[in-house]
Image (cartoon, helix red, strand yellow):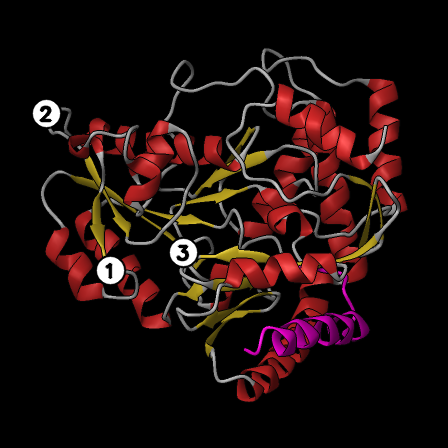
Amino acid sequence: MKQEEYIQQGEKYILKTYNRYPVVLEKGEGVYLYDAEQKKYLDFGAGIAVFALGYGNKAYNDALKEQVDQLIHTSNLYYNIPAVEAAEKIVKASGMKRVFFSNSGTEAIEGALKVARKYAYNKDDSKDYEFIAMDHSFHGRSQGALSVTGNAHYQDGFIPKEFRAVFAQFNDLEDVKSKITENTCGIICEVVQGEGGIYPADPEFLKGLRKLCDEKDILLIFDEIQCGMGRCGSLFAHDLYGVKPDVMTLAKALGCGVPVGAFVVNEKADGALVPGDHGTTYGGNPLACAAVNAVFDQFEEKKIPEHVEKVGQYLWDQLEILKKEFCTITAHRGLGLMQGLEFAPEKSAGEIVSLALEKGLILMTAGNNVIRFVPPLIIEEKHVDEMMKILREVLKEKDC
């Protein structure tokens, strides 16, 4: 079939919860994707910050092929070798205590929230527990994750107001303090807000949250689903701040395309959940955990965090130049290979992304009129130059 025929078929049979771009992606190679008509695209979206190793990584692909021939699923009634090995790698890398594997980032958030609630329940089961979350945050689409997502647009129609978290201003410690009550069981935040517009946390804010949670004996949850796994220039974004959470959620680049998520607990939070409190049929299956193991091996072999730090600085410098060239670029934010350009209200970031796509460049939007740059973590400076050339052409054509 031709590309247009696939699009029409998809519109007919797939539930329309996305406004998809009119492109059918068929294959990938390195940092490039190809559609069904073999048009080539430079990928600066990485499947929403997922495909960190790029496309066609032989060691990663071989590990998955080998696992498919051995064992794909057993259930969590038994141990499996890839899960045990992957758990050890995550725990040792994070310096935390234990991990639970899920199928997605949203499920990881659900589990993290249950840990915090159960921790509070074990101390005093008479309270109506609540969370403090951040305005403009995004934690997923399930009802629990939506309850702590600081955007009414996602919540309305699904989460009654009485079931939503208490929301505070991101990077405003005094506002968080003012929202603490005897019912607060946890504080959850992204180390770098992604969907909200690429906002890194201030160091003093994270340090203040850590101190506050210690004083109140409540759990601090860091959502590193998008900003973790090397994207900000360290394996975990919070490492850049020297602040440790009680619970951390991971997904996206954790499996580099294979659906897998996880939440990791420290010594304090370990033991809050006991057998029967939480579970999953598919989470931690051998195939998903073979992907996790391959990702950690490749990150170590290719020194991914160090590479991101270097190329991320180059991307930063080039975007700063672009910001000075075009007066409608009003802000530039981010860390490593998670950066954003904000545009003046009269210019549509979405339209710029669409025009870039026509020229063979995949970008993404985020937040309020922001273009998000979250490419595969293996990009080189030459790919930044190629991206900049196309983006500059689009901005000139749009008279930005």
Q: Which SS class for mark 2?
A: loop
The magenta segment is: 375-400
Distance between mark 1 and mark 2 Cα atoms: 29 Å
In-front residue for pair 89/382: 382
Distance between mark 2 and mark 3 Cα atoms: 35 Å
Q: Is 393 inside the magenta-drawn segment? A: yes
Q: Residue 262 at what x, y percent from top left? A: 53, 36
Q: Is 226 inside the magenta-drawn segment? A: no
Distance between mark 3 and mark 1 Cα atoms: 12 Å
Q: Residue 201 at what x, y percent from top left? A: 39, 65
Give the residue pinned by disc 2.
126
- Occupied quadrant, residue 42: bottom right
Q: Residues within 10 Å of mark 3 (few under 14, many from 20)?
A: some
Magenta region, main secondary structure: helix
Give the residue pinned by disc 3.
196
Quick check: marks 2 and 3 in contact, CB under 8 Å? no
Q: Residue 251 at what x, y percent from top left? A: 57, 41
